[in-house]
Amino acid sequence: MNGYWHYVAISGLLGFALAIQNHWSLFIVTIICFALLRWYSLPKLPLFLCVVSLVLSLFMNHYTSPSLKPFPSDKEDWSITITKAPEIKSDYIRFEALEEETGQKWLVYSFAPSQLSSAFQYGATCEFKGTPEKPAQARNPGAFDYREYIYSKGLQGIIVMNDEKVVCSDGTFLSNIFQWRQTIIAHTQETYSEKTASWINALVFGDDQYLLHEEVESFQRWNLSHLLAISGLHVGLFIAFFSYVGIRLGILTKGKMKGMIMLFLPIYAVLAGGAPSVMRATLMAEAVILMTFLNQRWRITDVLSIIVLFTLWVNPSLLFQLGFQFSFVVTFSLLLSKPIFTQYNSFIFSLLRVSFISQLAILPIQLDTFYTYNPLSLMMNLLYIPIFSFLILPLCLVLVLFTFFQGVLTNWSDWLFQKIVNLCMDLLLFLDRIGYLEIVTGELLFGLMVMYYIVLLFMMRQWALGNEKKTFLWAVLLVFVLVFDACIPYFSKVGRVTMLDIGQGDTFVIEWPNREYVMMIDAAGAVKTNEDVFSSVIEPYLLSRGIGHVDVLLLTHHDVDHMGSAAKLISRFNVNTLITSPYYEEGGQFENQITVRKGDIFQIGETSFHVLHPERDMNSTNDNSLVVRSHIGGKSWLFTGDISGEYEKELSTSSVDVLKIAHHGSRFSTNDTFLRKTSPEVAWISVGRNNTHGHPSQEVIERLKQEKIQIMRTDQYGAVYFEFLDGTGTFYRHAP
């Protein structure tokens, strides 16, 4: 079996993917893979194990999938064991836990006073009363899906703890290690400045909650996040550092040092937070050291393949965690590319190849998750990987040891570390301001992702063989796959009108066929101060659709629930033209702003927008709303802003197909006369769930039902959209 285990691992991965995705392209890929294995005359034993791996993975996922198990909605009494170190915040504590009775895993939230936090330790068994809740689904395309995230971690749902009576038993040996971890983190914060301590705790102990948001965001934008996550690089430095110190000081022989590393490496993995990348690196290191003791020679790819299968069979949900995907995909890619690194002896060229291959390996995952790519990130990795590998990370390990020798030594090292980190961050933030280049690709089609990896394998094969011509041709095809995916909207004859679910407010996105134009009507902001509608809804939706530029933004009136995200939208998506009424407050601040009033007509391509209101200043923000009528996708549309019924009756409009109900369904709008006048087929209502205003009014709903008008509400349907082709279209809703 030596040299064949990666085939078994790939078969297992296909099994898990087939069980979860159930996509037609995966079936085709599976058939092709097994046909190729047969064509390459794979020996019977590896081929048999491939089939076993595929079937076993299908079964394991079906057996462990949280979404397939019944949800205990009425349960109150709980007995759970904490399986992950609790995350302690100022206003809540949360941790993952296992319910022994059912074998289900949960995410538990406690809003108990901070003095109770000591009871929640890794390995402790707790009894309490609590309410189970299903995590919320994404209500807009492209948005973060919390339910999918919870399920990807193998969790059944959320339990909100009733903190009146909580009884927890003592933890286990592992809980003592986690407690030691918290003690060291606290000790580091006491010893060093806030900035230095935040970096040490992130890079040594995997606790990045104290890093500045601006710093983390800059690392993400330049594809440097892997440097902030503990991975094989950190584990390798840990081994090298303590091996060098132990052997140089004559404390232990090489053999005994290997034994000590095997003993303490799992402890460090726990101290480092136990992330998938840490566990992968730890298991690989343990396996390699064990083989040296046993005088066994296995290929590293075989070792990694067995580790992949083992970890996924224990916890199949890891397959859909980004940390697991990035860690194993990059490691596999680098191991299989070993012949490429031996072609040149230059350190710079080798580092460039490592960075380049790593970027190629994770690019599809990155595009499918974040919808954008910064091509200059390759050069930034080339610069920052050596800085972190040979300077910042070793310094962090040394600074941890220095915490036991407080005084001048810690003060001087703290000052030096801050200077180095500040220099690195200043450079990164400076380049982020002047040289950030973003390519918006949108959501990557699954079939094209599969095709990308097939082409990448052939390209890497030719590169390893030193065949430059064929490598170049495969590279051209690889680029073509990505360009084709990004260009699909520009060749698609399908247009779309979308009403986003942003809660209590309005945001509409109109996409013309062939991506000729993109227009938005309103850009709602957060009604509550702890929400960020732009970052959580508007931005991810536009990016997922491959939209990096908005041609026209029409703001109906100056209310936060209609224009609160306008400034961010204009800055982020380079809006060409802003349209408002003459009575819009704070007007004239945008260079390309135009004002329109009743009787005006403006064109976007061949589409005309007729302005029906306002004619004069109504001395009311809501009644000064712009009202526009247009014909899009074979249907007539009327967007009414927040005008009241008093001015609805003054609108000079005939019947329409789709009516945007004014003011989120307020009882002061949408009267019987107006409905009979417009006689819409479909009514769109943008309204927040469980809002305090009582919108939409039951009176309005009854009027719509009486006129037999189809009602589509964001509080019930999530985002609602109308897709059209050649004058005909269909209405869809995002949430089930």
Image (cartoon, rainbow, N blue to C red):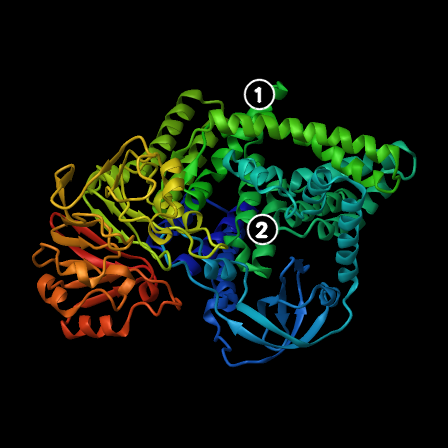
Marks 2 and 1: which is nearer the front?
Answer: 1
Q: Residue furthest right?
A: 250
Residue at image coords 36%, 35%? 482
Who comes first in sequence, dot 2 or dot 1? 2
Vertical order, 632 against 698 (above or below): above
Q: Quadrant of the C terminus?
A: bottom left
Question: Disc number at residue 308?
Answer: 2
Residue 549 in percent (x, y) is at 32, 36
Residue 24 in percent (x, y) is at 33, 54
Q: Could you say which is closer to the camera, residue 676 or residue 597?
A: 597
Vertical order, 102 against 548 (above or below): below
User: Dots 2 and 1: beta carbons under 8 Å?
Assistant: no
Residue 496 in percent (x, y) is at 23, 49
Residue 269 in percent (x, y) is at 71, 50
Query: Mark 1: which amino acid?
Result: Phe
In this rendering, position of residue 452 left or right of residue 192: left
Q: Could you say which is closer to the camera, residue 694 or residue 115?
A: 694
Query: Mark 2: which amino acid?
Result: Val
In this rendering, position of residue 49 left or right of residue 304: left
Residue 266 appearing in the image = yes
Residue at image coords 24%, 74%? 699
Residue at image coords 31%, 30%? 591
Residue at image coords 28%, 54%? 620
Pointer 1 local density, CA inside 10 Å: few below 14, some 14–19, many at least 20: some
Residue 341 appearing in the image = no
Local SS, label 2: helix
In this rendering, position of residue 557 left or right of residue 318: left
Question: Disc number at residue 257?
Answer: none
Pointer 2 local density, CA inside 10 Å: few below 14, some 14–19, many at least 20: many
Residue 229's image quarter? top right
Gap in angstroms between the C-alphas marked 2 and 1: 30 Å
Question: Disc number at residue 349?
Answer: 1
